[in-house]
Image (cartoon, grey):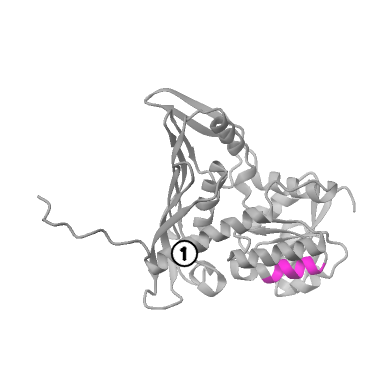
């Protein structure tokens, strides 16, 4: 293998307009091929991004000896199929979040990765931004005292029409599209798995067994008394924030999941006084993630986040989805008298 990881891209989803330039900007990788369901579409994207090879099918790209690893930006429901096919073809895999749609599917990926000796990483790119390195440093330094509450909001308006988020058979819906970030960041900052979860959802086509969730509010209870509250949706005003509150202070981060390269600020508050604004230099977290992945492949070093982490995230998402759809939360008891 050369000193650069040779990437192939499976698909021309909208996200590749941001991620292909990031893959190309990485110092230890290069994009050498892109595939679409038609040669015309593949060639259009190849020409637009300066990619040498265009493939008329995903299978044709996987068969190429010129490609070491693939980036998969396909709809959620197609991830498992093409991760397994990529591994069978001898390609390492960086896949958009969520890696797959269940813990059982993640176990299939793990077994195949172990069998082939290849690397697989779930593409939560925000984890590689220096903002989160600083945030974890502050938490470790007891900046908020005993962490008590995590509050995450992540929503936007997906519009209507043929957006894949409106199709359950493609793995759409708010929880698996935007809610997966809320669950992932809560697990990351606590370095724990929740012991209890609950959720409440709003749904499109409410009488359909296969109804799609448009918005979800969830609660995660972690050992030691930390509670994470999140709300997320794909038909709401754009919101994107993370707040960590403890006995000694509060940390606040605006736009924690955005693909931003400009400088940002991490706010540290202490009971209305001694507010500190930590200025964080802008970096493309997708570039940093791809460089970490490439380094792991080229040098045989461990990935920062493994498939056990991905399976645990999927397990929490499944539990939240089940709770929301089955309305498992108990109704409050009837009061003995009317409130005055």
Does 311 sit left or right of 36 as displayed? left
Q: Which residue is at a point 67% across and 64% down the rendered structure image? A: 107
Image coordinates for residue 218, horizontal then vertical, percent: 42, 55
Residue marked by disc 1: 321
Per the rendered image, the range of residues in magenta is 81-89
Image coordinates for residue 237, horizontal then vertical, percent: 40, 54
Callout 1: 10 Å neighbours few (<14), some, many (20+)? many
Q: Which residue is at a point 12% across and 52% down the rendered structure image? A: 339
Query: Seen from this angle, which residue lies furthest left?
Result: 340
- Which element is circle 1 on? helix
Q: Which residue is at a point 55% across and 42% down the rendered structure image? A: 189
Per the picture, the main secondary structure of the magenta-coloured stretch is helix
Residue 236: name its quadrant. Answer: bottom left
Image coordinates for residue 265, horizontal then vertical, percent: 52, 33
Residue 79: name its quadrant. Answer: bottom right
Res. 63 visible in picture: yes
Res. 263 visible in picture: no
């Amino acid at each position: 293998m050369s000193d650069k990881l040779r990437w192939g891209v499976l698909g021309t989803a909208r996200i590749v307009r941001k991620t292909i330039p990031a893959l190309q900007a990485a110092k230890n990788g290069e994009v050498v091929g892109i595939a679409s369901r038609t040669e015309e579409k593949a060639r259009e994207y190849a020409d637009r991004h300066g990619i040498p090879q265009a493939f008329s099918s995903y299978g044709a790209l996987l068969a190429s000896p010129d490609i070491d690893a693939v980036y998969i930006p396909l709809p959620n429901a197609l991830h498992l199929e093409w991760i397994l096919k990529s591994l069978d073809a001898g390609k390492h895999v960086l896949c958009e979040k969520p890696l797959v749609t269940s813990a059982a599917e993640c176990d299939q990926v793990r077994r195949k990765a172990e069998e082939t000796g290849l690397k697989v990483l779930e593409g939560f790119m925000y984890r590689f931004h220096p903002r989160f390195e600083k945030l974890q440093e502050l938490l470790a330094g007891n900046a908020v005292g005993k962490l008590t509450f995590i509050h995450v909001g992540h929503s936007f308006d997906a519009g209507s029409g043929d957006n894949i988020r409106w199709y359950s058979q493609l793995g759409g819906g708010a929880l698996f599209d935007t809610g997966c970030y809320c669950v992932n960041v809560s697990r990351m900052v606590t370095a724990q798995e929740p012991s209890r979860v609950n959720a409440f959802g709003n749904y499109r086509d409410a009488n359909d067994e296969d109804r799609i969730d448009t918005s979800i509010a969830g609660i995660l209870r972690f050992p030691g008394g930390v509670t994470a509250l999140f709300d997320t949706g794909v038909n709401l005003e754009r919101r994107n924030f993370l707040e960590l509150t403890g006995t000694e202070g509060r940390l606040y981060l605006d736009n924690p999941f955005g693909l931003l390269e400009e400088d940002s600020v991490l706010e540290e508050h202490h009971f209305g006084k001694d507010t500190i604004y930590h200025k964080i230099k802008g970096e493309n977290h997708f570039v940093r993630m791809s460089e970490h992945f490439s380094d792991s492949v080229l040098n045989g070093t461990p990935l920062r986040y493994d498939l056990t982490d991905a399976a645990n995230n999927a397990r929490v998402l499944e539990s939240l989805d089940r709770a929301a759809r089955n309305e498992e939360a108990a109704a409050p008891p009837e009061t003995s008298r009317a409130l005055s």
